[in-house]
Amino acid sequence: MKAVVARRYGGPEALEIVDAPVPEPAEGQVRVRVAASSVNPLDWHEMRGTPYLLRLARGLVRPTKPALGSDLAGTVDAVGPGVSSFAVGDEVLGYGNGAWAEYTVVGEKGLAHRPAGLAVDEAAGLGIAAVTALQALRRGGLDAPRTWNGTGVEPMPPRVMIIGATGGVGSIATQLAAHFGAHVTAVTGAGNRELALRLGAEEVLDYRTDRLDDGLARYDLVVETNGARRTRELARLLTPNGVLAVVGAPPGDWVAPVTAVAGRAVANRLTTKTIASILARRDADDLAALADLAGAGAIRTVVGEVYPLERIADAVRHSESGHVRGKLIVRVAP
């Protein structure tokens, strides 16, 4: 089978397409014939081995597990002993390791059934980004549509700001927040204004020209999707008990990502506000819930561009540029 590997740490030039043996599923594993995958920052951090702390788990000098790729959509091809939720022929989506390949094996809890009518390219972009978005919103108390019993004064909808609202995580977070009944302010580029409105935002700010801080501490939740802005700047946007949920960290090979996360933890102890770093947990229930929402049309993957597997290096370069609409999809099967 064709598979993408990086046998050394480096940029996209380190990626190779090789002929690899078809893997066999072990206890609790499912083998998936992959139709499509996507590109996540996680994938190119593993490719580069940065921040360097990653190499403690992946190999100090060379990757011990050279296969790359996380998200996937495809068809169950074989099941290992003990698997009860999936059968050969099931259409699935999810995340695992080595998904930039024609076949990969995935733990049963890393998969969900792909709803009928959900296109394979959209399914392939749901995994890590969508789970991250859901868990970031949940940190701010949003994980279901608002309810009101009709008595008294109807409460105001929560006010949510999504920074990076049309990227991979942000496009799903914007849709989810709107679905849950929040008033959403999207921060994105001017060229993405109409997209942000279609995703459910009620207000759109241009990150290049508009001030985020208008002097009013009015947001119940701010989700920052690239970890680049200063915590102090974002905390000023929050109500006294508001939540800042930051995905990712500033760029850096050594200290910057670690100190940013540590700094948020310290800041969280010094305020009534909640300052949280979001590192997505691969949760089977969250994945299944998101698949159901996508199947019902409540959320959709914004497919920015589709690359064939042979152009995986170009897809990674595009992702690393930081200027991506929605998700970059990698088509594995024709």
Image: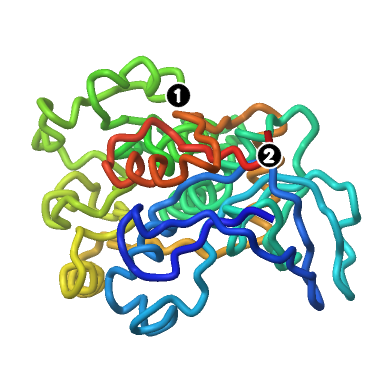
Quarter-wise, where is residue 101 in the image? Answer: bottom right
**Which residue position holds label 2?**
333
Q: Amino acid at mark 1?
A: Gly
Front residue of this view, candidates 78 and 90: 78
Left or right, 132 with respect to 71, comes to: left
| Mark number displayed over residue 200 | 1
112 horizontally vs 39: left or right: right
Q: Label 2: how many residues lie within 10 Å, few (<14), some (14-19) or many (20+)? A: some
In the image, what residue occupies the spot 43% across and 53% down?
136
Residue 264: x and y in percent read 23, 67
Query: Residue drawn 31% across and 30% down?
Result: 185
* Residue at x 35%, y 38% (from the top left corner): 160
Q: Residue furthest top?
A: 194
Numbered disc 2: secondary structure: loop
Estimate how packed mark 1 is, as few (under 14), some (14 to 19) or many (20 or more) residues with alpha carbons within 10 Å.
many
User: Closest to the observer: 43 or 155?
Assistant: 43
